[in-house]
Image (cartoon, rainbow, N blue to C red):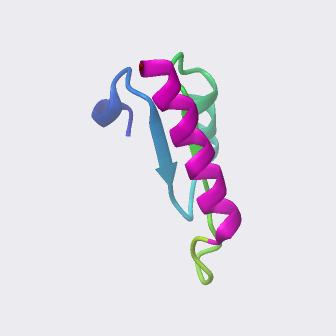
Amino acid sequence: MAAHVADAQAAWIDDDLDVEAHRWANHRSAPTLLIEPHSARGLNRDHIRQLAAFSELVSTQTN
């Protein structure tokens, strides 16, 4: 993931985020959102709300 996003804002959705993913996200200077949905249930409304709020946050930071 790090190679793909470089210094850009990022939302990473994965049902198997490990400790290294969380460490990477916590040490980035760019806004980063990690969402780890349950593998059998997938995304839920709360996840969508988190993504919408994150999108709003990063859109106001870049304008």
Q: Which residues are magenta?
A: 44-62
Residue 5 falls left or right of residue 33: left
Q: Quadrant of residue 40?
A: bottom right
Question: Residue 4 in the image: x percent, y percent?
Answer: 29, 36
Question: Residue 34 in the image: x percent, y percent?
Answer: 59, 46
Residue 50: in magenta span: yes
Residue farthest to the left, as pictured? 4
Residue in view at x 34 percent, y 32 percent: 5
Residue farthest to the bottom, as pictured? 40
Please name whichever residue, 2 or 20, is drawn nearer the observer in this view of the structure: 2
Question: Residue 7 in the image: x percent, y percent?
Answer: 38, 20
Please name whichever residue, 51 or 60, is drawn nearer the observer in this view of the structure: 60
The N terminus, quarter of image: top left
Residue 46: in magenta span: yes
Magenta region, main secondary structure: helix
Q: Quadrant of residue 31?
A: top right
The C terminus, quarter of image: top left
Image: 40 above or below 26: below
Image: 34 above or below 39: above
Question: Residue 47 in the image: x percent, y percent?
Answer: 64, 60
Image: 30 above or below 49: above
